Image (spheres, grey):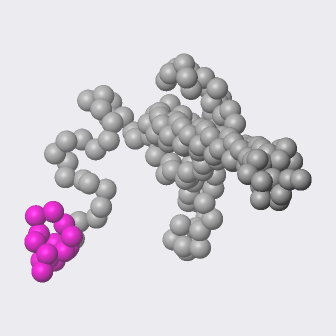
Amino acid sequence: MRTRAHRSNRGFTLIEVVLALAIIALTATVLLDRRLEVVHEAGRSRDRKTAWMLAAQKLGDLELDKTLWAGQGGQSSGDFSDLDGDYGGYRWEYLAERVPVETIDPLLSKPGLKQQEIFRLGLKVDGPDLGEPILLEAMLPVQEPQAQDPATGTTGTPAGSGTTGTPAAPAGTPPPRNSPGVPPR
């Protein structure tokens, strides 16, 4: 007859080996699934960062576009493939419009004065795997076109006229503390 001590030296039973393999397989599945989530999240983060960078680029381009701000505004859409072919999947859309500014200043709300306006610029950037588009809104001052001097053909104040758009201080008034060339006290 065999003794119990002899039987324990034979190794693992089939059930023990199968159970150990099942535990290893379950652990590997959970770890691989988590790794895939991390990789996908890194890709989404990269895409959002790229979309924000492209949105900032487009916003800067729109702010520098003088023709857009000369009239009542405008709207357009397109993609970023002109920057790089890799950005062709990212699309932009903007709307720029003049909007009135509500004011409670009695000097600015007198009858006969032109109502103050600003440009409101809305920019939307969407891309692959972003989930939600990037939405930006900016408020920019309306710059009325300056009158052109028929004699010189230039715009603005003629050179040497001394007019800067701010009223002159009365004689004997010290210069403001923040003016150039005046050291702080």
Residue 47 appears in which quarter of the rendering? top right
**Is 155 situated left or right of 62 in this image?**
left
> Does residue 97 appear anywhere in the picture?
no
* The C terminus - image quarter: bottom left
Residue 89 percent across, percent down from the top left? 64, 26
Provide the residue span drawn in magenta: 170-185
Residue 172 percent across, percent down from the top left? 12, 77
Q: Is residue 50 above or below residue 115?
A: above
Q: Kindly identify the residue that appears in the image at 77 percent across and 54 percent down.
A: 6
Residue placed most toward the observer, 137 or 179: 137
Residue placed most toward the observer, 135 or 50: 50
**Is 159 situated left or right of 96 in this image?**
left
**Is 40 situated left or right of 46 in this image?**
right
Residue placed most toward the observer, 105 or 152: 105
**Is 79 situated left or right of 158 in this image?**
right
Q: How many marks?
A: 0
Residue 101 appears in which quarter of the rendering? bottom right
The residue lying furthest to the front in this view is 1
Residue placed most toward the observer, 102 or 183: 183
> Does residue 150 appear anywhere in the picture?
yes
Q: Is residue 66 above or below residue 178?
A: above
